[in-house]
Image (spheres, rainbow, N blue to C red):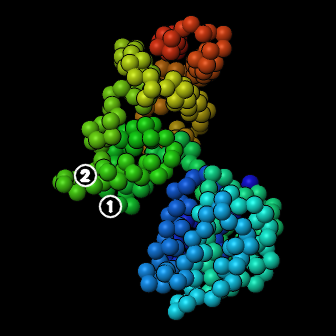
Amino acid sequence: MAKQAGPTYQQIITQMKSGDWKPIYLLMGEEDYYIDLIADYIEKNLLTDDEKEFNMTLLYGKDTTCDDIIMAARRYPMMSQYQLIMVREAQNIKNFDNLSAYLKQPLSSSVIVLCHKHGSVDGRKKFVKDIAANGILFESKRKYDNEIPSWITAYVREHNADIEPKAANLLAEFLGTQLSKIVNEVDKLLILLENQDTRRIDSAMVERNIGISKDYNNFELVKAIGDRDILKINRIIDHFAKDPKNNPIVVTTTVVFNFFSNLLLYHSLRDKSQPNVAAELGINPYFVKDYQHAATIYNSTRTLYALGLIRELDVRSKGFGDSNTSHRDLLREIMFKITH
């Protein structure tokens, strides 16, 4: 895999806004969102609508060879400073190494954009090194689960609005890590804010418009576990059992495991100030108090015990050694053991 040594998305956009266009862009990675953003920006801003008619070539990887790309790139623009060769689904192209010959002397008037999705190219390949030397090599990595709430918060703030930490966590839990999916849903909420007095997304707004229950979700389950609120834990588990499709046990297991992993890390910290805990656990400072409280209920020994029980839950929920117990009853059993 290629290393994330190239410029960031913001750096690339800033560079292009200044009129600094490179002869080739390799946009690759598992996260489509930034690949699409950069490619769309180039398509909208390199050429005018009139110039596109004669100077833009759109190719698709499954129907394209490197020779096709090179042939298009060696043409000169017509009544334009640049011509654009946009290659979608570039991951389907074979023998990328053939581009190296062209990259020795690329035309400054041609801009090649390779959109390589669903993975990255081996950074040891010669053509990758040639692209890095002559153009832009950008790797769009998928975000980790714990990075999504802060990413949502930053995205909302970029649009001159604010979001409640709990609401950001609800969206992250429900929507997963695919940024384009998250953006689609958050954009709906931002549009709704235009008709409100305050530009702040809260959990009630998320519940009304995204279809997420603000009271019965994994975020609230973790909070109930941290409070040792057994009644609320069982109510949430019963709610999950009524709608297992939207509340898969594998997600619940992961969320609860991450909570106790963070709690174990919290116990090991010497500096338990809010800023340090938030930084070390990678959480919003708003939630530090939940770990402070949970730590008074679950000491290091009980936290390790809980992690063992969650591993047991994971194995049994997948049918290993226990094929008869329902997911509801498994959750109830493990949560009872954790909280008693």
Q: Position of residue 79 (x, y in %)?
A: 52, 92
**Separation (CA) of disc 2 from disc 1:** 13 Å
Tell me the kind of residue under disc 1.
Answer: Asn
**Residue sitting at the far top:** 324
161 relative to 42 in the view: left or right = left
Q: Is residue 258 above or below residue 233?
A: below
The one nearer the camera, 224 or 238, is 238
Q: Is residue 216 above or below residue 282?
A: above
Q: What SS does tag 1 mark?
A: loop
Residue 25 in sight here: yes
Q: Position of residue 163 (x, y in %)?
A: 34, 48
The residue labelled by disc 2 is: 192
Name the image quarter holding residue 168.
top left
Say which quadrant the N terminus sits in: bottom right
**Residue sitting at the far bottom:** 79
- Numbered mark located on residue 160 in the image: 1
Residue 6 in sight here: no
- Numbered mark located on residue 260 in the image: none
